[in-house]
Image (cartoon, grey):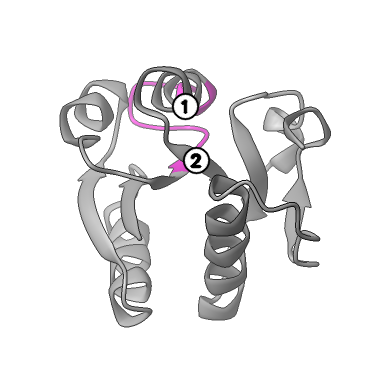
Amino acid sequence: MRVLVVEDEFLLAMNLENMLSELGHEVVGLASNKQEALEVVDGAEIAFVDVRLSDGVTGPEIAETLKARHGVTVVFTTGNPEMVLESRAGVGVVKKPYSDSIIRGALSYAAARRQGRHVPAPAMLTRIPVAI
């Protein structure tokens, strides 16, 4: 899969990029705010989007745009999952800190949802009820 990482903490972004690459996925870009995300989104199929970024709490807005205008399947990453449980833009929320296995499960789930398959969400992924 082609994946976009939207995360303003440099070390977390690099760590997630490495995880995704090791899992055999292509990271199409790293972004730390809304403007950067929209500049590098081309070709992305899935995006991991932090909620609170360098330009504020713009993750939900970015996710809406990625989904509506670019057809990207979004998984939120945040220390506060309750901040996005009402969002219709994401298929789930990964709580920070996360591990390789959590990212692998979230990515598999997002890929299945992208393909229109209704599969159970992995235990480590908080489902967003209105998006399911």
Residue 131 rendering spot, x and y as whole percentages: 72, 32
What's the distance in space between the residues labelled 2 and 1, CA to CA?
Answer: 6 Å
Q: Secondary structure at mark 1?
A: helix
The x and y percentages for residue 79 are: 63, 48
- Circle 1: is it few (<14), some (14-19), or many (20+) Cα within 10 Å? some
Q: Residue at x 55, y 75 (%)?
A: 99
Q: Is residue 78 visible?
A: no
Looking at the rendering, in which quadrant would you find the N terminus? Answer: bottom left
Let me know if residue 57 is in the magenta part. yes
- Which residue is found at the position 27% from the left and 54% from the top? 10
Which residue is drawn at the image coordinates 28% and 37% (left, top)? 32
Q: Residue type at mark 1?
A: Lys
Residue 87: image tag: none
**Is 82 displayed left or right of 9 in the figure?**
right
Residue 73: mark? 2
For mark 2, give the secondary structure: strand
Q: Residue type at mark 2?
A: Thr
Magenta residues span 49-60
Q: Which quarter of the figure is the C terminus placed in? A: top right
Given contact means CB atoms under 8 Å apart, are the residues at marks 2 and 1 in contact?
yes
Residue indicated by mark 1: 67
Observer able to see residue 102? yes
Is residue 15 depicted above or below 117 in this figure?
below
- Considering the whole magenta stretch, tell me its main secondary structure: loop
Q: Which label's residue is closer to the chain start, 2 or 1? A: 1
Q: Is residue 56 above or below residue 122?
A: above
User: Which of the 4 image quarters holds residue 69?
Assistant: top left
